[in-house]
Image (cartoon, rainbow, N blue to C red):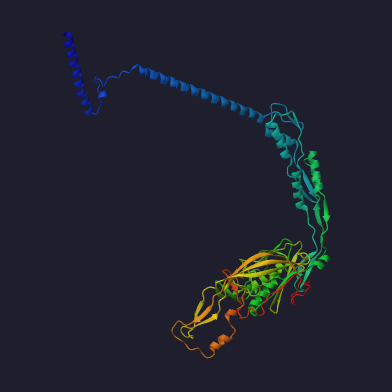
Amino acid sequence: MSQVNDRQKSAVRTSSRTSGSRSQSGTSRRQGQSYRSSGTPGRRGKKRKRGPEYNVTRVVRILLFAASAIVLVMAASKYLEAANAKEGSAETSATLETELQKEVTVDGISIAGMSREEALAAIEKQYQWGMKVTYQDEEYELKNLLDSKVKSLLEEIYTGEAKESYTLDMTGLEDAVQTEVQAIAAKWDVAPKNGSISGFDKASGSFVYSGEKNGVVIDQDKLAADIQTQLKAKNFTTVIAASANEVAPKITEAQAKEMYKVIGTYTTTTTANKDRNKNIELAADALNGMILQPGETFSFNNATGERSTAKGYRPAGAYLNGVLVEEPGGGVCQVSSTLYNAVVFAGLTTTERHAHSYEPSYVTPGEDAMVSFGGPDMKFVNNSSCAVAIRASFADRKLKISVVGIPILEEGVTLSMSSTKTGELAAPAPVYEEDQTLEAGVEKIEKAETKGSRWVTNMVTKKDGVVVSDEFFHNSTYRGKPATIKRNTSGVVIPATDGSEGASEGSGENPATVTEAPGPGNNETTGGVTTVPKETENPDQGTTPVPQGPGEDGGSSIIQPNPF
């Protein structure tokens, strides 16, 4: 009975504590505090008892942590050991690089305890470089051929198992020596000078010749052998005297006078336009007597200079952006085109050539050369072994240009151009002009349209008159010209004055027959200039080009067969 009462009292106390705890917990929550912090005893406030399995888990965790720590310590130990070994190796290598611990000599020069740089300085102090080559009053200092040999030997000593004694070996420098010898020869060699054209006397119209002169050639084989001997003897500051041989020219002055001839020539016929012809005369005179040495490049624009009124060039009809204007220098493209043909026939190498915008009348389309000062140019190079000269003359509307030189082509070989029209291009839309003398609805073609064209030019090589090759040379494209058509759209007809229509038709001013030297910029004007003669002329009469082979006169009396 006593035990029952005790249990009831205990239950009451427990119930009382629980109720109080809940009450206080609610109060604590309302006050923003946790029931755990209230300090009120209860189940939630007590620490949870952990079973024996908790201790086992804790022991396992400790063991795993300890094992991991051991692994990390072992790995760190191995890393430090490897690093120390590497550092020790580097220190050992650095020790070898910086100083030799054993006695080592090069040609008796001790380098023990020296770094590589110190060893290089010690050897070069003993063996100073200053080898020179002289010829007459000139001197050439050879490149230091010792330095590479010393550095190669020190590389062997400082990176391998060093021996006690080494000898500096100066063999195996043949290529380096030959390079130096060639540089010396290039400096002092003088090519022999052949007898050649050297000037032109315009007063007498004859060329002036200069005499031959011996050349000088350094004896490269002997010089190379002398340098090798001094290198092996380790005489690095010696002075070697080069020897040279005289070389006679192949052509004397007397022989040159006999050998020089016209090797390419071409003649064209100009219009009756006096201003245009004056421009052609001035340009031809600027070219006459010009001499080009072997390897020299000719430029038409440089040869004539700016074609300006200050130099006597006259305004002549020209197309500027499709509009007929008056510009100084009209007609010079006929000179450049005539020269171009002569140059090709001579066998010289053309380096710049441009087709005109429109088909030319004075040369076959595809065989013209348009120029414009400050723009397109006509250039060629003297690819022969002797000087060449240009002979140009203009008289009686005949322009003749010849190239004078010692023949470049083999005897019996001739060059020419063959041009073929391969297609036509549509002409621009017609240009209409108002003419109130015409009845309404009537159209009159004042100038017929000209279609554009494409041309292919081949280089034809003949041997004793027989074609041996016919190969592509270049393409040319020319624009068409619009027709000019008169009409009356005003609705008002004005009677023509007596004779005015007949005068127009009979005056000869037919724009369809204007002879042109077309192309953008055929004189100093840029923007597409085409030279047009002021006077109307049938291009089929008096303007046919006269092609000529090397040395042929072509029936012209302007330049005699012997231009000297």
Residue 452 horizontal/vertical position (percent): 58, 72
Measuring from the top left, give residue 387's x and y in whole percent: 75, 64
Quarter placement of the C terminus: bottom right
Q: Quadrant of residue 401?
A: bottom right
> Is residue 67 positioned above or below 261 on the image?
above
Q: Is residue 163 left or right of 276 when viewed as pictured? A: right
Q: How many marks?
A: 0
Q: Is residue 134 left or right of residue 4?
A: right
Quarter of the figure that contains the N terminus: top left
Snapshot quadrant of residue 63: top left
Residue 286 picture location, percent across and down: 69, 71
Question: Taking 96 as reference, is 263 left or right?
Answer: right
Residue extending furthest top?
A: 2
Q: Is residue 239 visible?
A: no
Residue farthest to the bottom, as pictured: 498
Left or right: 514 in relation to 111: left
Residue at the image position 19 percent from the left and 21 percent from the top: 19
Q: Nearer the viewer, residue 194 or 425?
A: 425
Find residue 349 and report its horizontal and vertical position in percent.
70, 63
Residue displayed at 63% across by 27% down: 92
Q: Locate residue 462: give its quadrant.
A: bottom right
